[in-house]
Amino acid sequence: MSQSLRTPASQVRGLGAAREGTDHYIKQRVTAIALIFLVPWFIGSALIAAKGGYNSVIEWMAHPLNAVLLILLLGAAFYHMRLGMQVVVEDYIAKVSSRQALLILNTFVVTGLFVATSLSVLKVWFATG
Amino acid sequence: MATSQGVDTKPLSPHVQIWKWHWTMAASISHRVSGCALYVGTVLLAAWIISAATGPEAYALVEAFMLSWFGRLVLFGFTAAVTYHFANGIRHLIWDGPGLAFSPGAASFVSFLNFLFAIAVTIGIWLFAYYV
């Protein structure tokens, strides 16, 4: 038996003092790996579509492959953003009430933007495609 | 441990002013700054998508902003933030996964390459945007 002060149950659970273990670390990296593929696709694909103006953008967004990839991009990016901003708030905002308020605001902003943008993509896809 | 003069001889955590500026430090700070910039800039991306679903008039407003000099400046900054955060993010994944390029020399060199990548790819994307 080691000299650790942690109980055997705590060591088996592996959740540490913050009670969430490696959850945050792994999610930040899994979303990052998804974005390695999705971001270059989006920059190239959306840039060409946007150059053609409104009709070209609608045609692009209504294509099933583009709609699916775009929603995947939005999901990965907003999740990644939420985790990143959470760490920034936790690092710099010492006052507990402000910190908790900003962490909740972070979740609300990101969730709101994800729902609004992904439903927009679906609307264009179902109305046009 | 306190000496007879009451001076603490334990090493102190360095203060902001006496850090020597170096590449890995600049890369780390830039990663966080570009991440925060992307958080704000994503509102513009969201506006672009939502306006497309709203209709031609709404889209025209967002498009007019993006094509204005200020909009182009914001998009250029957004492009630079994306390319930098992308390159440095891959560096972090390589550190966390295979654990390569961890020696001080290699880490500094890769940090320098990240900035070079961001500048080159940002210029490349904008040349593509204007001439293709």
Image (cartoon, rainbow, N blue to C red):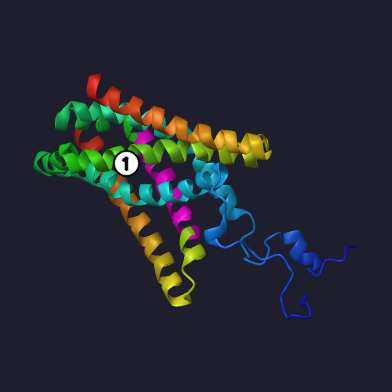
Q: Position of residue B11 (x, y in %)?
A: 71, 65
Q: Name which residue lies at 45% across and 30% down.
A: B117
Graded by Cα atoms within 10 Å as few (under 14), some (14 to 19) or many (20 or more), the crowding at tag 1 reads some
Q: Is A77 covered by the magenta stretch?
A: yes
State the predominant SS element of the stretch in magenta. helix
Q: Quadrant of residue A17?
A: bottom right
When the figure is inspected, residue A90 is found, relative to residue B102, above or below; the finding is below
The residue located at (44%, 44%) in the rendering is A76
- In depth, the one of A96 and A28 nearer the eye is A96
Q: Is residue B84 left or right of residue A124?
A: right
Is residue B91 visible to the viewer in this orientation of the structure? yes
Question: Residue at (16%, 43%) from the top-left corner?
Answer: B65
Amino acid on which the number 1 mark rests in the picture: Gly
Quadrant for the N terminus of chain B, please.
Answer: bottom right
The stretch of residues the image draws in magenta is: A68-87
Residue A94 percent location from the top left of the image: 49, 72
Question: Residue beneath label 1, please?
Answer: B77
Which quarter of the image is occupied by the C terminus of chain B? top left
**Above or below, B20 relative to A90:** above
Furthest residue to the right? A1
Q: Quadrant of residue A8?
A: bottom right
Is A47 on the left or on the right of B14, as rendered? left
Label 1 SS: helix
